[in-house]
Structure formats: structure tokens, C-alpha cells
Amino acid sequence: MITKILDIFISLVGLLVLLLMLPWIALLIKLDSRGPVFFLCDRVGLGGKIFKMYKFRTMYQMPLPIGGNVSPQGDPRVTPVGRFLRRIKLNEFPQFINVLKGDMTLIGPRPEAPDLAALYPDSAKRIFSVKPGLAGPNQIFGRNEEELYPPGEDPVRYYIEHILPRKLPLDLEYINDPSVFKNLKYLFLSVKVTITGALSRQHLVDNYSQLVFLLCDITLCIVSFSLAHFLRYDGFTRPEFHQFFVKILPWALLIRIPVFIYFGFYHTLVRHLSSYDIKVVFKGVTASSLLLIGVFFFGRLETFVKYGRGVFIIDWFCLTTLLAGYRILLKKLYHYYRTETVGSQHQRRVLIWGAGDGGELCLRYLQKEKENSYEIIGFIDDDPKKRSYRLNGAKVLGSRDHLEILIQLYKVEEIFVAMQSVEVHEIKQALDICHGLGVKAKRFKLSAMSYSEPSPQQASLSQVDKSLSFPESVIDLGMATKSRS
């Protein structure tokens, strides 16, 4: 009787909390991927009866089932928002509906999928003699079960052979000695591990750099809004505007950070920061600023009018500059540190022939070489429209007619030919110049970019190779390897 009262009371409280969070969670799920907000799955209940268990959808919706009922860490079926919901266990909140319906209870063995329940040994099927629970001993002692699966193992087989034998004794022990006090103990512990287990030590280690990014962004959001207020009102001298500032600042953080996470601010490592991430910063700050203005315009119109819309415009400019600026600075520091760690190792000075897609890919490849052994001088390209323009920071210095001058002027040691197609006489001319000046020539093979047959007047680089030999290695983008020509 006491257990039933606790089930009803706590479920009502849980559903009240769920109703408050539901609009935001539903919006995130819908923005993240197509499909319903809720996911109903079959589970084995009291006496082996099958019932529908409620969850927030955390996986991509697929026309046919793919994979098993076990989901290890890194499961590609799980959506980005789904990973977040699973991490803090919000995806389980709709199960309070099952508790109120009587399909489940608060504390008990977790409900099992029918196909996995069929594999239970006969001695363990007593687990189905009680109602499954929203929380239980296994969820307390194995809070982040998805982290237990080794990479490369069949998740279902590993679950049956390794995890299930550890779970069943705990559930059977609970069934053999039930009590109200034990339920209260497990209820308290389940709340505790739900909060403390959201960020395990391993999770913090694996996502250290992203957490640093997040903390820096939160700090800069505060700095930017404070600076915008200071510039708009010449300080914090007027009490009424100071009160508005204190009220709006928490809302700015609550709105901006989820938007930043949605736009993928924290999905890139420092060494891979690029112009794409700067564009993402611009989009994320713009979207969060418009959302912030919308919230205060429609929800707190009087405050919005009195406080002054100029603050939000200044804040948008300051925050975009700060977030983009420190990311660019971090990338520069990373390259500087990487260069310093190489020490006194000689960097070969190279020119890239072809300021197109192939040249850009060649540039990126050379910049990411682990040994950091190349210094990119720039590009040569016969298209006069590209002259003096930059491609990912490297300048187009001239055409192939300037090759001899450029080699001597910049002390070039290697030439990388990165063109999809090239005329035979052009490549011969370039090779003669390189050989005459003692400069090595390499081919950057674009096997992944051969979309069409060359014209009769042109020969692809692979055809040129039949009559011309490059003295050094070939970099094959398709294979990402080096081989001798």
C-alpha cells in the first residue's frame, strides 16, 4: 500500500516536472531529426505480459529496425540531442506515465526487451514475477552501462555473455528481500547517481577540450553582455538599468548556450578549427541573439523597450568578435606550438601548381602532415582572375610562366602539381625548369576527383605519367598514402 502511494505521488511530481520541460525537449528533438517526440517500445512486464514503455525518442527514425535492442556508447543510431538526453537520463522521464498506469513501479528490475528476455535462464525468470521498475539496483551500480561495451564486440552477444550475468544476481537478490525501506534507499541512490553520473571521470577526460570551449564561451557571453551594457549606458551608474542587466543576463546564458550546442560549437578539435567553424559562430550568435530579442519582445515588452535595443546589437557584435577571435588565436597558437615542437627540423619550401579544388586539398594535406615538414610558399595558376587572391591563406603568386622566377625568388625546393588535367607540353616545360634548378617535382594525384574523361587536347595526370616520370613520391588523395613513381 505504501509502495503504491509512493508510486502515485512521485509519478505525479515527475509528470509535473515533465510538463514544464516538455516544450523545450520536444522542440530540440524535432529540430534535431525527423520523427515523433515520444518512442514506444515493447517491454516484458509482470507475469511476462508485454506492455508499451514510453521514452523520449533518442534515435533516428528508420522505416525498418536496424541493429539490436542494445545500444553501446557511440551508437550511430543515436541523435546528437538523444545523446544529451541519455546522458542526463531525461529520456526516461515519460516512464512516469507507465508507473501511473500500473505497468511499472518506481523501484524494481528494469523492464527487458522481449527478444532479450527470451534468453534468460529458467532460474532468472522469477524476475518477471514482479513489476519492472523505473530504477533499480542495476541502474545504481551500472549507471553508464553503454560505456562497458568494448569496441568491435557484438553488443547483443556481449550483453548476454558478460553484462547480464552480473545484472541478474542483483535483481534476484532484490526480489528475494523486498522492503519499503530498501525502496526508499534505492530511490535516494537513483536520484544521486542520475545527477553525479551525468559526467563520469572518463567522460570528462574524453571531452576535456570541448568542456574548456564551453566554459570559455560562457565566460565570454557574460563579458560581452557586460561590455555592451557598459558601452550603451556609460557604465553601471543608473540603478534601474542595472536591475534590467541583472534580470536579462541569466536569460542570455540560458538561451545562448543551448543554441551554441545545437549549432555544433563543440564538435571540432582545436587542431581542426577552420573557416567553417567561424561561420558556425556567426550563425549561432546571430540565431541566439534573435531568439533572445524575440523572448523579451514578446514576453517582456515593457522591459525590452525601457532597456534599449542597442544593447542587444552591441552584444551581438562583441560576442561574435570574441568567440571567433579566440578560436582563430587558438588555431594560431596550436600551429606555433606544433612548429616549435618540431625544433630545428628543416621545412621544405613548396609551391602548389593549381589554385583550384585540387590545390586546396593539396594545401590542406600538406598543412596537416604530422612532421610539419612543409612551408607553403603559395600557388601558381594560369587563370589571371585568381592572381593575388588567397586560397585558405596561401597567395596565388603567378602563372607557370613565372615559375623560374618564383623558384629563385622564394628559394622553392619542391613543386606539387595538383591539377585535374594538364596539357602535356605544359608539364614538360615545368619539369624542365624544375630539373634545371634542382627542384623536386611531385604529383598530387586526385583519384577521388576524376569525374569526366579529358578532352582530346588534354591529358590527365595519370596519362602524362606514362611518358613523364616524377622523380619523387606521389601523394594519392584517394588512398591517402605515398608511393614511389
Image (cartoon, grey):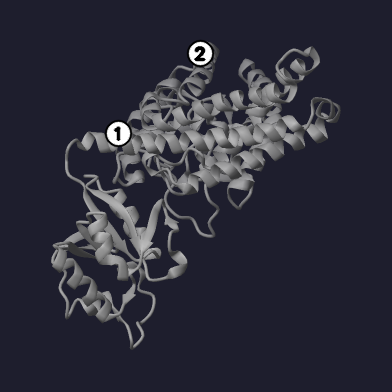
Residue drawn where x is 51% and y is 21% of the image: 195
Task: Look at the numbered discs 2 and 1 and tell me whether their residues touch, using CB distance below 8 Å.
Answer: no
- The answer to whether residue 100 is above or below residue 446 is above
User: Real-space Cα distance between discs 2 and 1?
Assistant: 52 Å
For marks 2 and 1, the one nearer the N-term is 2
x then y, percent, for residue 116: 42, 43
Q: Left or right: 266 with respect to 371?
A: right
Q: Amino acid at mark 2?
A: Lys
Q: Tell me the residue that label 2 is attached to.
A: 185
Q: Left or right: 317 with respect to 157?
A: right
Q: Amino acid at mark 1?
A: Tyr
| Residue 288 or residue 406, whichever sits in front | 406
The local crowd at label 2, few if under 14, some if 14 to 19, many if 20 or more residues have their Cα within 10 Å, is few
Q: Quadrant of residue 294?
A: top right
Q: Secondary structure at mark 1?
A: helix
Quadrant occupied by the N terminus: top right
Residue drawn where x is 35% and y is 82% of the image: 454
| Residue 384 or residue 405, whichever sits in front | 405
As drawn, the label of residue 406 is none
**Res 130 visible:** no
Give the tally of numbered discs. 2
Q: Tell me the residue that label 1 is attached to.
A: 337
Q: Left or right: 70 with respect to 264?
A: left
The local crowd at label 1, few if under 14, some if 14 to 19, many if 20 or more residues have their Cα within 10 Å, is few
Residue drawn where x is 41% and y is 51% of the image: 393
Residue drawn where x is 26% and y is 38% of the image: 339
x then y, percent, for residue 29: 61, 44
**Res 17 visible:** yes
Residue sticking out furthest to the right:
302
x then y, percent, for residue 211: 45, 29
